[in-house]
Image: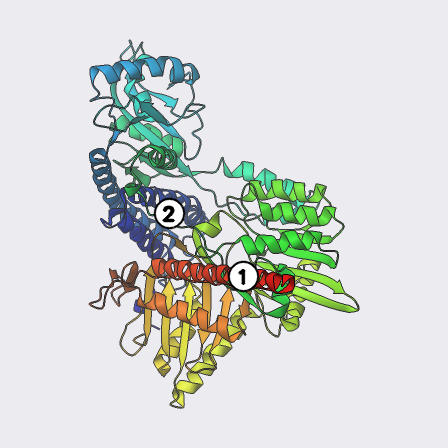
Amino acid sequence: MSNKVYENRELSWLKFNQRVLEEANDKSTPLGERLMFSSIFSSNLDEFFMVRVGSLHDSMLIDDNDRDGKTFMRPSEQLDAIFSRVKELVVLHGKSFEKISAKLESAGVKRINPEKASKEDKAFADKYFKYEISPFLSPLVVDSRHPFPFLNGKSIYAAAQLTSSENEKILGIVGAYGVFNRVILFPSDEKYTIRYMLTEDLILHKMHKLFENYEISDKALIRVTRNADIDANEALFDHELDFRAKMSELIKKRKKLCAVRLQMSNSFSDDMVNILRKKLDIHKSQIFVESAPLDMSFVSDLLDIMREKCSSELFFKPHTPQRSIMIDDRTPMLKQIEKRDIFLSYPYESIKPFIRLLKEAALDPTVASVKITLYRVAKNSQIVDALIDAAENGKDVLVLVELRARFDEENNIGWSKRLEKSGVKVIYGPEDMKVHSKLLLITRRSGNQVKYTVQVGTGNYNEKTSALYTDVSLMTSNEEIAKDAADVFNALSTGTLVEESKHLLVAPLTLKQRVLEMMDEEIIKAINGKPAYVGAKLNSLTDKQLIKKLIECSEAGVKVELVIRGICCLIPGIKGITDNITVISIVGRYLEHARFYLFGASDEKKVYISSADFMTRNTTKRVEVACPIYDPEIKARVIEMFEVMLKDNVKARVLGKDGIYIKRTSDNGALNSQEYFYSEAVIKAEAQKEVEERNKNSGILNWIRNLFKRRS
C-alpha cells in the first residue's frame, strides 16, 4: 500500500491543534471564547510535548531505527518535523493572541506592559511588587559556586545575563511563580473596565531590583516542558508494593524527567542560550521563542473576572443542559429503565437523571449490588458520593478505579482511598491494560426475580465534563446486555479478559475482531452490487489494521463516512484507493467526544455507541466497551445525529486528498450541528413542559368539577 494514503500520527495531531487555533481566529466567535481557544491551543501543546514528544524522545534514545508503521519515519525524523511545524504554529499563535488582545482592549480589557506603563501604573506596580511579590522570591546566580537549579516543568522563570563587578558574565534566575496570583488587577478607569498585568512580566521588569550588584544586559522569561511519559505498568512489576503506593512513586518520578522543550519570551544572548541548552541537555531545535504568554493558564482566571465585570457579548450565550423528554421526574429511574431504554445526549441534555439513578439505587432496598468503572471523575463528585452512600447502606459496591488515567492519577488515588474507607471494594483491573470503558451494572432482587440495569456511555462519569463534552449514555434493562456486562466485571475482578461476548463488543479481544467482521460484511454486499455503508464518529483513527480494512471497503465500493475530531492517519479521496471515503472534523464550542459505529445502508443498519476510538491503544491495549442500540427510536436518533454532523457547514472541516483540512461552505444556509442539537433539546424540553402543565391544569380542573358534582 502506497504511503500517500497514510498520515503521520503526530503531524495529524498538530493539524488538529491548528484547527483549535483557527477557532481563536474566528471572528464570528465572541472575544472571550476566542481567548479561551487560544489557551486551549497552548495547553494542548503542553500535553503533546509531555506525552507524545516525550515518548518519541525516549524511542529515539533506545532505537532510532524503530520506524513509524504507516509513514516509516524514524523517531528523530518525526521530532524534526514536529519541531519545525510547532515553530510555525507558535508564530501564528502569537499573532492570534496579539489580535485578540487588541480587540479586548477596544472592549475595555487592557493588558498593561510594565515597560510602557504610565507613571501612576508604575507606582502601583512598584508598591505591589514590594509587598506582594518580592518577599516570596528567591533569586539565584549560576556560576562556579552556585549550581544550576532544577527547573520545575511548566513553571515560568525570569532569567537574565548578569555582568559582575569582575566583568564575569553569569546567569541570574528567579522563579516567577509561587503564592501570588498571576493576574494583577490594576484600578479601572473611564476607558477600561479591566486593567491587568501578568506577574511574570512585572518580575522580569524588576530584575534589576533582584540583582542589584550586577549589570543586566539581557533578560527573558523561560519555561521548561518535561517528559511526562512514565510507564505506569512499572507499578505492576514490583509485587512487594501495593499498586497504589507504586503509582504515587511514579507520579513523583514524572516531575523530574528530562526536558523536551524550552520556551522563551524573546531572543536571549547566545551565551545564555548555550548555558541553558547545556544545563537542560536539549538541542537548539527544541527552543521556541514565543510572543504570546508562555503559559496561558491565567486565561481561566481572567475570563472569570471578565464574566463578572464585562459585557455578556464577549461570551457565548449560556447553554443549560436540558431535561430529556425520555425522563419522567415522578417515577423512579429503575422503574423507567425497566419499561424502556433511555438515552441521554450530553451536554444538550442533563446528566442529572443518571446521578438520580445512582442515588436511588443507593437507597432502594431491592438493590443488592452496584458495579462501575471510573476513569476520570469531577473533583466534588456526586457520583462517587452516591457510590459511598450505597456501600454505607449495605449494598455490595465494586468500583474499578483506573489509577493510570494520565494526569488524573493523583486525583484517582485519593478517590480510591476514600471509597475503600467507606466499604467499597476497589479494584484496578488487569496488568498492562488500562480500563477505559464506561460501564455500570446494578443488580436487584424483586421477589424471586433477579433484575438488572445497565448503563453504557461514551464519556467519563464526570458532572463537569458532561457540560463541556459531547457524549451519549444508554440505560437499559436488557438481560442479554446485562449478562455481557456481568462478564466484563467478573473478568476485571479476576484480572482476566473477556474472550467471548454476544452483544457488547469488549476490547481488547472482541471489539476490533467484530468491527472488522462487520466491515467485511459490507464489502461482500458491495461486491454483490448491494448498497453498503460504514460510518464512524471518533476522536482519532490510528489503528493500521482498521485503516487497511476501511481502504478495502472503499476499493470494494462501500460508502465510508467518518467524523473524526482529532488524529486521522488515513488520507481520503485518493482515486481508486480511498475515493469512497470522506472525513470531516468538527471543532466548536463543545469538545466532540462521543463515538458511534454504523454498519449497513438499509433499515437493518447496526448502530453502536462506544468508549473506544479506532486507535491501537484502544483496540488492543485497553478494556473498552461498545454497546449495540436495539431500541428503534434511539437507533433512529443516533443515525439522525450522525447525519446532522455530516451536514455541518459552520464548524466542520473536510480533509482533502492533499492532507489539508478546509472549512466546508454551502449555499443552503448555515448548519452548526452543536447549536442544532442544543436548540432541538430546548424545543423538546419546552414542549414536554407545556404538555405536563396542560395535563396538570386539566387534572386540577377535573378535580374541581368532580368536587362540585359531589356537593350538588
Give coordinates of residue 399: x percent, y percent: 66, 52
Can you say whether 454 is above or below 590 in the image?
below
Residue 479: percent from left, percent from top = 66, 71
**Picture quarter with the N terminus:** bottom left
Give neighbour class at mark 1: few <14, some 14-19, many 20+ (Cα, 10 Å).
few
Under mark 2, the amino acid is Pro
Color scheme of the displayed model: rainbow
Instruction: Write the residue at 68% across / 46% down.
Output: 388
Gap in angstroms between the C-alphas marked 2 and 1: 37 Å
For the residue labelled by badge 1, is the local secondary structure a helix, a strand or a loop?
Answer: helix
Q: Which residue is mark 2?
A: 318
Position of residue 364 in the picture relative to residue 572 (left or right): right
Viewport quadrant of the C terminus: bottom right
Residue drawn at x 43%, y 50% as measured from the top left: 320
Dot 2 and dot 1 residues touching (CB under 8 Å): no
- The three-letter code of the residue at mark 1 reads Leu
Residue 541 visible in the current orientation: yes
**Which dot marks residue 581?**
none
- Image position, residue 607 (x, y; %): 48, 73
Figure quadrant of residue 149: top left
Q: Which residue is mark 1?
A: 701
Percent across and percent down for residue 201 are: 30, 25
Point out the frontmost of discs 2 and 1: 1
Specify whether 70 is left or right of 215. right
